[in-house]
Every structure is written in structure tokens, then in C-alpha cells.
Amino acid sequence: MAFLSIITITYNAERFLERTIRSIVDQQAAEVEYILIDGASTDGTLRIIKYYQRNITRWLSEPDQGLYDAMNKGLHQATGQYVWFMNAGDEIYDADTLSKLLARMEATQADVYYSDALFVRDVVEQGAIHTVPVGLRSQVTPHSLPTSLTWHDMALGMKVCHQAFVVKRLLVPDYLLNNLSADLDWEIRCLKKAQRIEYVPFVLCKYLVGGLSVQQHRRSLMDRFKVLAHHFGLMTTLVNHVQIIWRAGRFKTNT
């Protein structure tokens, strides 16, 4: 049994996948298993997976019911004490991050570890793609990052980037299907079960801006409301959304 399971979900993302794989396998440790779940991609994804398959513990390529169905498959494949999602396009922050995280996890054995994420964006310059930093999530979005996190902190939305959230596998539920805010619901449910939640004082990941929820923004907002109403109640969520809308507008004006 591995100590940590790192899981990558991908679908037709050959342009982004290799950077994710390299960020993991270049610093892979004996305590880590690497699982890759592909949704039967039709581009060059399988070629990339097969090139790196000696560094991948298990991989699967088959049709699925969407992102969160694939993430559930990844959870069911995992054997590690902890699970960490690093999806296609995202990267472990730097060459020292994994070793520092493993040392901290082995020393303290918390239920949840979380930190900040560096937002990055791809830009094209002279025909070549370059990845440039946008800023830390806690600085470039309205979501400040508390150093003593509880599930109640999620009342105004997702405080922690999903790729900067590591959880004991025995605590994790399956993701909701057909809800673009299923990652918010998943984090809340994990935090509700956790007895010890630990802030990590170094950045865990690079998050590539422009994911599924950004592409389907209106539905994402509706799904977020459903998740928050389920956990915090309808009236509380209605009141909180006044603050969410005001905060988003104020943040946009200031930035």
C-alpha cells in the first residue's frame, strides 16, 4: 500500500498532459503511487500515457460520464493512505514540493492538508506556448485562505483550490455526478469528517486557469448555490449570496 496516491484525470488534453505527468514523475518517491484516468481520448493522449507508463502505477482509458465520474474511478483505484488530485494541465509547484509534503504528512498524520495554489495561464508568443504566472489564488480571487480551516469557511464558496487539498483516503466520499461544483461539495464533506486539518506553509500546485467550470460559468454558479444550500441551508445561502455578489463586484473593481 502506498502512502500517497496522486491521481490525474484527463480527456483529449494532449497539449497539457505531459507537463502534469513530468511534474509528478520527475520527483516521484517510493511512498507514492501515480494513477491516471483517461476518458477514452481521441487525440494523442494515449501516446503520451504509454511513453510514461513505466512511471505510472495504474492507468485506465475508457468512456465515462464526465469529470467527476472519472475522479470517482481514480478514488476507487487508489490504495494510498492519502489522495491528491493533479489533473491534466496542473502541476506540482516545484521540485521540492512533494518531498516537503511527504515529510510533513508522515510527521503529523493529519486528516487534511491544504495550501495555496499558483494560478498560471498559457500564452502564445512567436508561435510558441509559454506558461506565465497569474498570481496566488488567495490574491487574485476573492477567496482569502484561512490558516485554521473548517467546513464553515466554505459558506461563501470554495476557499481551497482542489489541487491544493490532500485528504486521508478513508475519509473521502464519492463525487456528485452532473454538478459542476462537485469539488466544493467534496471538500466540505471531507472537512466535516476530518478531526485534524493542517495548513501547509508552502504552495502545493500550479493551477492552469480555464477549466470546465469556467467554460460553463452560469451552470457552475447554479450548481454552487445547490451545494451551499444543501450544507448551510436555503436562507443562509440566499443571504450569503448577497455578500458573494458584492464581494465579487468589489474585487473586480479593485483589480
Image: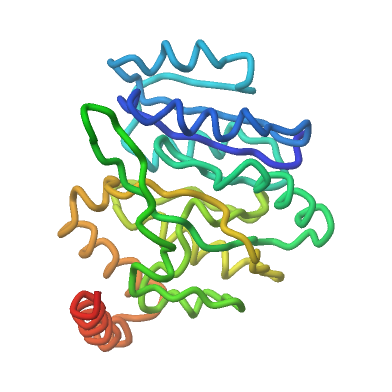
Q: Is residue 14 left or right of residue 55?
A: left
Quarter the N terminus occupies: top right
* Residue 128 higher or lower than 139, as above or below: above
Q: Residue at x 78, y 31 (%)?
A: 30
Q: Position of residue 255 (x, y in %)?
A: 24, 74
Residue drawn at (32%, 37%) of the image: 66
Q: Quadrant of residue 241?
A: bottom left
Percent coordinates x, y for residue 245 in the rendering: 21, 80
Q: Residue at x 71, y 70 (%)?
A: 196
Residue farthest to the right?
Answer: 107
State the count of labels. Answer: 0
Q: Return the residue nearer the eye: 88 or 193.
A: 88
**Residue 122, picture quadrant:** top left
Q: Is residue 147 above or below residue 102?
A: below
67, above or below 128, in the image: below
In the displayed structure image, the side of residue 202 where residue 140 appears, left or right: left
User: Farthest left residue?
Assistant: 218
Q: Using the rendered view, name the quadrant where residue 115 is placed.
A: bottom right
Q: Is residue 173 above or below residue 80?
A: below
Residue 110 drawn at (x, y percent): 74, 62
State the residue lying farthest toward the front.
126
Color encoding of the figure: rainbow
Q: Nearer the viewer, residue 148 or 193?
A: 148
Residue at 49% x, 66% y: name it: 188
Q: Position of residue 251 (x, y in %)?
A: 26, 78
